[in-house]
């Protein structure tokens, strides 16, 4: 069942008392224990408090994500969910990195343990300077695992899939100057992956 709920905020900690007709808010006991976990909706001049049902979906506006109620919490990125709580999820983890001087930078982006990775994408948000003319994205001992020949120019991007691969430990993404060093610049990187939850 799909429930056309528009959640302005996940926790209901800001603004659920605003009377926007038809908007819903997930309530936690920071407001009122009697409605903890329910959806608050202002309809026809009054507040209504509705307990979510497993399988309901919502758009969480302040996270720009769709979420599904799994019987306990709102879970993002759900592709499929079994009757016992087994779940396949798709996630995108993003990090904004400021390049430091040197040939190798650890970007702060972590591919989680047991994640099935599709792609590491990037966009240069502040022109990368230094002695390099191209750079790559990868991991330790595999400098071009995700991409190579990347341009340091402002707004250059990379979105090619790297081929589905499962990682068996938390793994740091690094960027590598291919023919020189970084001096400065900004780049946003994103890991696109699936992960899984066992039956409850």
Image (cartoon, rainbow, N blue to C red):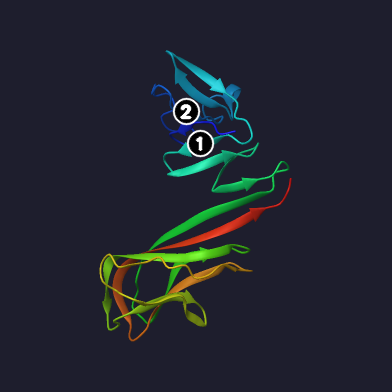
User: Is disc 2 surrounded by few (<14), some (14 to 19) or many (20+) residues within 10 Å?
Assistant: many
Mark 1 or 2, closer to the camera: 1
Secondary structure state at the residue bearing disc 1: strand
Above or below, comparing residue 115 to residue 183 in the picture: above
Q: Position of residue 9 (x, y in %)?
A: 45, 36
**Up/down of 105 relative to 2, above or below:** below
Name the residue rendered at 62%, 30% in the picture: 53
Q: Which residue is mark 1?
A: 58
- Quarter placement of the C terminus: top right
Location of the N terminus by quadrant is top right
Residue lying farthest top? 45
Q: What element does badge 2 sit on?
A: strand
Residue marked by disc 2:
24
Question: On the picture, is 114 further left or further right than 16?
Answer: right
Q: Is residue 196 rendered to the left or right of residue 106?
A: right
Marks 1/2: CA distance? 9 Å
The reply to whether the C-beta atoms of the residues labelled 1 and 2 are less than 8 Å apart is yes
Residue count near mark 1 (Cα–Cα under 10 Å), binned few <14, some 14–19, many ≥20: many
Q: Position of residue 112 (x, y in %)?
A: 57, 62
Q: Position of residue 175 (x, y in %)?
A: 41, 75
């Amino acid at each position: 069942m799909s429930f056309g709920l528009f959640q302005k905020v996940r926790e209901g900690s800001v603004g659920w008392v605003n009377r926007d007709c038809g908007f819903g808010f997930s309530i936690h006991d920071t407001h009122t224990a009697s409605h903890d976990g329910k959806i608050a909706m202002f309809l026809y001049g009054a507040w209504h408090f509705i307990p979510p049902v497993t399988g309901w979906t919502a758009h969480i506006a302040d996270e720009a994500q769709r979420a599904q109620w799994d019987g306990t919490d709102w879970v993002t990125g759900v592709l499929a969910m079994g009757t016992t709580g087994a779940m396949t999820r798709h996630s995108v983890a993003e990090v904004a990195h400021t390049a430091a001087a040197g040939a190798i930078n650890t970007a702060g982006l972590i591919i989680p343990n047991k994640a099935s990775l599709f792609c590491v994408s990037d966009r240069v948000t502040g022109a990368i300077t230094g002695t390099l003319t191209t750079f790559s994205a990868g991991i330790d001992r595999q400098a071009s695992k995700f991409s190579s020949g990347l341009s340091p120019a402002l707004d250059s991007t990379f979105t090619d899939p790297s081929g589905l691969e499962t990682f068996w430990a938390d793994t740091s993404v690094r960027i590598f100057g291919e023919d020189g060093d970084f001096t400065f610049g900004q780049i946003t990187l994103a890991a696109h992956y699936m992960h899984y939850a066992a039956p409850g």
